[in-house]
Image (cartoon, helix red, strand yellow):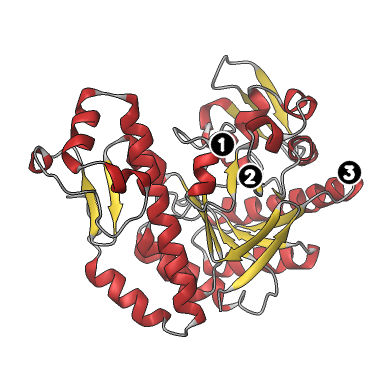
Amino acid sequence: MALGILKTTHGEIQLPVFMPVGTKATVKAVPPKDLEELEVKIILGNTYHLFLRPGHELIKKMGGLHKFMSWNGPILTDSGGYQVFSLTKLRKITEEGVEFRSHIDGSKHFLTPELSIQIQDALDSDIKMVFDECPAHDSDRTYMKKSLELTTRWAKRSKDEWQRLGKNGLLFGIVQGGMEKDLRLESLKQILDIGFNGYALGGFSVGESKDIMYDVLSSTMDQMNIIKAPIYLMGVGEPEDILFAVNLGVQMFDCVVPTRNARNGGLYTFNGKISIKQARYFDDPEPVEDTCDCYTCRNFSRAYLRHLYLSGELLSYYLNTVHNLRFFMRFMQKMRISLKNSNFEQFSADFLNNYNKDIA
């Protein structure tokens, strides 16, 4: 059962939950007060980006990330590992950590499990992630095994540093292993042996097909449902993928799709995704979705949203993002209700029957 409650310093979170991504101490285009009105309960901040700019020391001096960005709800910070490892040509992995060059100015930095936790501690996030390696999904088996073993050693070092600093907030371990089912289970056992407040699945939705992702995720979750702790699927956020994962017992999700698609004119509805730039919406007087209670749908037509987008107006980013975030909050709320009422399978079937997976 994916239902649950996660208690943090800044409030309780009903699970399952979707976390909008606030990479640089902001969910793009939407101020914190509006996030509260949209019923967003937790956001994600990015350790790598905040480390490089403006720097964790400044954020600590300003009272921590919550005060810095004026957000009173819970914050989860990733470890920075994924961003570092995505800079393939700019980094070098060693046992001690990762040497990399900033994508901003080319300056050289060295990020270790200990420093990652120190940065997250300075940010004062409610949920911290261990430093891990996220290898490419098509890495060969030999490399994948070495990688997961390195992730385990880094996880232990991350936990040691978290304990040394006073166990501030919650600490989640990360299971790796690529698309190799047995390596996933090996990684899971090693991470469980260390022990964490929650457990994340990393290395999914990084280029593999959905069939493969679903197969490996199912196999891994078969061994995780006995865990009495939150389970977090990192970076996966399309509605159909969330439904599949929740059915397996996953409880936490994050993804850039609501905000990124909004900025590109892609809007989510319970009848499918639409592309607001299409000519069909030129004189359409209807809201994006007549059942949606967001500010955008209560006040503006599709014709107006299309006009804003094609005109390059900044208001387009705001209104589109408000709608998409509200869609995801409503989607998760309906899902939690269906789980509580023991009719999740019917909810899932009905949703997928109406939902078009391709932007029109």
Q: Earlier in the sequence, mark 2 or mark 1?
A: 2
Rendered image quadrant of residue 186: bottom right
**Residue at horizontal 34%, vertical 25%?**
314
In three-dimensional space, the C-alpha distance between marks 3 and 1, rounded to whole angstroms, equals 24 Å
84 horizontally vs 150: left or right = left
Rendered image quadrant of residue 241: bottom left
Determine which of the numbered discs, if any, sits on residue 345 in the image: none
Contact, mark 2 vs mark 1 (Cβ under 8 Å): yes
Q: Earlier in the sequence, mark 2 or mark 3?
A: 2
For the N terminus, the image quarter is bottom right
Amino acid at dot 3? Leu
Closer to the camera, 300 or 311? 300
Instruction: Kindly state the secondary structure of the residue where label 1 is placed.
Output: helix
Residue beneath disc 1: 83
**Residue at horizontal 35%, vertical 33%?**
317
Q: Where residue 346 sits: x, y (%)?
A: 34, 81
The crowd level at tag 1 (other Cα within 10 Å; few <14, some 14-19, many 20+) is some
**Residue at horizontal 49%, vertical 41%?**
34
